[in-house]
């Protein structure tokens, strides 16, 4: 008899415990699912010295989480940096348009950078851009050097820009693709596809190789006088940033 009573008491206790749990759950506030935060894609303004090659290259990147606006202005060094400042402020002052999240200046060393005035202008442009909070993607001697590094492990040192076009076309010849000469120099879809492709020998992405080579050559210098640091390019810094949003 005692055993029966004990079992009955245990069953009743379990029942009451369940009822208390149910009552407690009813009193708990319902947690509504929060709406996912709407993320705004950052916009990157790239102001280029060249009107053809650089804009046609940067515009080929298909970004999933950012927007690129590449402009070829025809200005160089200090005047280009000031133009970039003007363009960035113009959009900031337009209440209907969101400001740029990043501004980059892309320019080359003047072929006569051995001239003290030209060298001073080049170095001043870099410092001025940094003062304004802009990124700098300069090339010494020219932007095409960055393209070459995708296919050839150039070790830095003297390489006159007058030979860039021939070098690029020689590197592209096995793929039956041509880089047009003066006057156009557009990065076509076919060329860009090769730049983004895989190197046959190393089985590494060519853009990764270009970044590694450009960084290594850049690190050969102390950057106290970039106008004299041939051959080098900081385009790899901008590309590393762009690739974060691919």
Image (tube, rainbow, N blue to C red):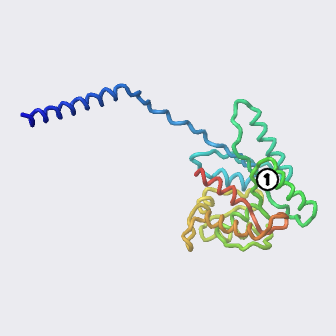
- Extreme-left residue of the structure: 1
Question: Percent position (x, y) of residue 213?
Answer: 67, 69
Query: Residue 199 versus residue 127: which sits nearer the camera?
Result: 127
Q: State left or right for residue 30 relative to residue 200.
A: left
179 versus 37 height, above or below: below
- Which of the 4 quarters of the picture holds residue 77? bottom right
Q: Residue at x 69, y 60 (%)?
A: 236
Q: State left or right for residue 89 relative to residue 177.
A: right
Q: Quadrant of the N terminus?
A: top left
Q: State left or right for residue 135 relative to residue 76.
A: left
- Which of the 4 quarters of the picture holds residue 235? bottom right
Question: Percent position (x, y) of residue 101?
Answer: 69, 43
Query: Residue 218 versus residue 188: which sits nearer the camera?
Result: 218
Q: Residue at x 60, y 65 (%)?
A: 206
Q: Residue at x 25, y 31 (%)?
A: 18
Q: Neighbour class for label 1 at 10 Å: few (<14), some, many (≥20)?
A: many
Q: Give the total number of marks visible in the rendering.
A: 1
Query: Residue 197 versus residue 45: which sits nearer the camera?
Result: 45
Question: Percent position (x, y) of residue 233?
Answer: 74, 63
- Extreme-front residue of the structure: 2
111 versus 54 height, above or below: below
49 versus 199 height, above or below: above
Question: Percent position (x, y) of residue 62?
Answer: 59, 50
**Residue, disc 1:** 49
Label 1's element? loop
225 versus 158 height, above or below: above
């Amino acid at each position: 008899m005692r055993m029966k009573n004990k079992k009955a008491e245990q069953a009743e206790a379990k029942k009451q415990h369940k009822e208390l749990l149910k009552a407690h759950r009813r009193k708990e506030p319902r947690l509504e699912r929060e709406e996912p935060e709407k993320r705004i894609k950052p916009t990157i303004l790239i102001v280029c010295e060249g009107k053809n090659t650089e804009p046609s290259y940067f515009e080929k990147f298909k970004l999933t989480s950012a927007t690129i606006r590449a402009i070829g202005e025809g200005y160089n060094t200090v005047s280009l940096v000031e133009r970039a400042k003007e363009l960035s402020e113009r959009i900031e002052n337009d209440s209907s348009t969101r400001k740029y999240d990043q501004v980059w200046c892309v320019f080359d060393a003047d072929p006569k950078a051995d001239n003290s005035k030209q060298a001073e202008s080049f170095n001043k442009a870099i410092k001025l851009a940094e003062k304004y909070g802009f990124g700098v993607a300069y090339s010494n001697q020219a932007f095409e050097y960055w393209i070459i590094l995708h296919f050839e492990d150039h070790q830095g040192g003297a390489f006159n820009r007058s030979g860039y076009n021939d070098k690029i076309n020689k590197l592209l010849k096995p793929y039956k693709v041509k880089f047009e000469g003066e006057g156009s120099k557009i990065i076509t879809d076919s060329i860009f596809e090769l730049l983004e492709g895989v190197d046959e020998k190393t089985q590494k992405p060519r853009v990764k190789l270009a970044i590694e080579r450009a960084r290594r050559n850049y690190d050969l210098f102390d950057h106290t006088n970039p106008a004299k640091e041939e051959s080098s390019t900081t385009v790899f810094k901008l590309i590393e940033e762009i690739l974060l949003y691919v």
